[in-house]
Image (tube, rainbow, N blue to C red):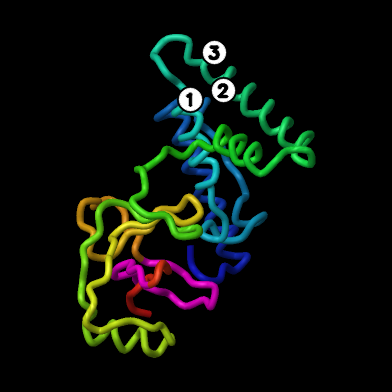
Amino acid sequence: MQNSVAKSEVTYASRYLKLFNEHIDLLYGPAHVTFKNSTVNFAQPWTHSAFIYESFLGEIKASVKSGTGVAQHIKKYMQLRTALQKMRADLEFAMSDEEKEYLSSMMSSSKTLANPHLVIGPAALLEEPQRMTFSEEYRHALVRADVAFDQSNKYPSYDRCIVNNELFQSSKYKRVKRQVNCVVLLESNKVFRIKSFIVISNVCYAMGHF
């Protein structure tokens, strides 16, 4: 897992990985004995990931609707998924935007999180907002961004927003403890921590810190 790996270190590691695999046979049986030269072929393990396959396994698991006929559930799901992919490839040129959107929704494995309270362009804001008078920090940020606002007004502030089917949460949102969706990487390659989503003149802004 280190930043650089010498050939001698790969040889050393390979020797002991093989020894480890020999003992796996005694512990778990021959079916679990495998060995791959992943470091030789692909470099250090942290440079490649199997998360995409884990995500697809979750999608397959979601297709199973009961404890009986599991293989049949998975087979029918894969058949339908393949048929929809072929349909989109063959007919996309002739479909309207509404038909494309419906087909995409049929193929999506993501669940609808909630009905949005307000939709502004690609941003779907969830739940009832709080109305806030901007702090000095917010006022300075909006002035630097040339955003016109009335300092005496109270503006709606949201803690959750869906953009391109991705859920983002403010750092103040505490109801979800197992994941942190308030830190994003911007197109400028800057890391940004979202503090809240505010709406001014029907435009949604993410407020926070670099």
Give the magenta part as a residue range.
183-200
Residue drawn at x 47%, y 43% as measured from the top left: 20
**Label 2 Cα crowd, 10 Å radius (few <14 / some 14-19 / many 20+):** some
Residues packed near mark 1 inside 10 Å, few (<14), some (14 to 19) or many (20 plus) = some
Q: Is residue 57 above or below residue 195?
A: above
Name the kind of residue labelled 2 in the image. Tyr
- Residue type at mark 3: give it: Gln
Residue at image position (27%, 71%) is: 155
The answer to whether residue 195 is magenta is: yes
Q: CA distance from mark 2 to mark 3?
A: 8 Å
| 62 horizontally vs 115: left or right | right
Mark 2 — residue? 77
Please identify the quadrant where the C terminus is shown.
bottom left
Horizontal and vertical percent for residue 72?
Answer: 54, 13
Q: Position of residue 38 (x, y in %)?
A: 61, 51
Quarter-of-image position of residue 86: top right
Find residue 52 and report its horizontal and vertical position in percent. 54, 46
Question: Looking at the picture, does residue 47 appear above or below residue 88?
Answer: below
Marked residue nearer the N-terminal end (2 or 3): 3
Q: Is residue 31 left or right of residue 198?
A: right
Q: Are marks 2 and 1 in contact (CB under 8 Å)?
A: yes
- At 54% from the left edge and 37% from the top edge, which residue is drawn? 108
What's the residue type where badge 1 is placed? Ser
Marks 3 and 1, how far apart at CA: 10 Å
Q: Which residue is mark 3?
A: 72
Secondary-structure class at tag 2: helix
User: How crowded is the residue under tag 3: few (<14 C-alpha within 10 Å), some, or many (20+)?
Assistant: few
Q: Nearer the viewer, residue 157 or 165?
A: 157
Quadrant in which residue 62 is drawn: top left
* Residue behind mark 1: 63
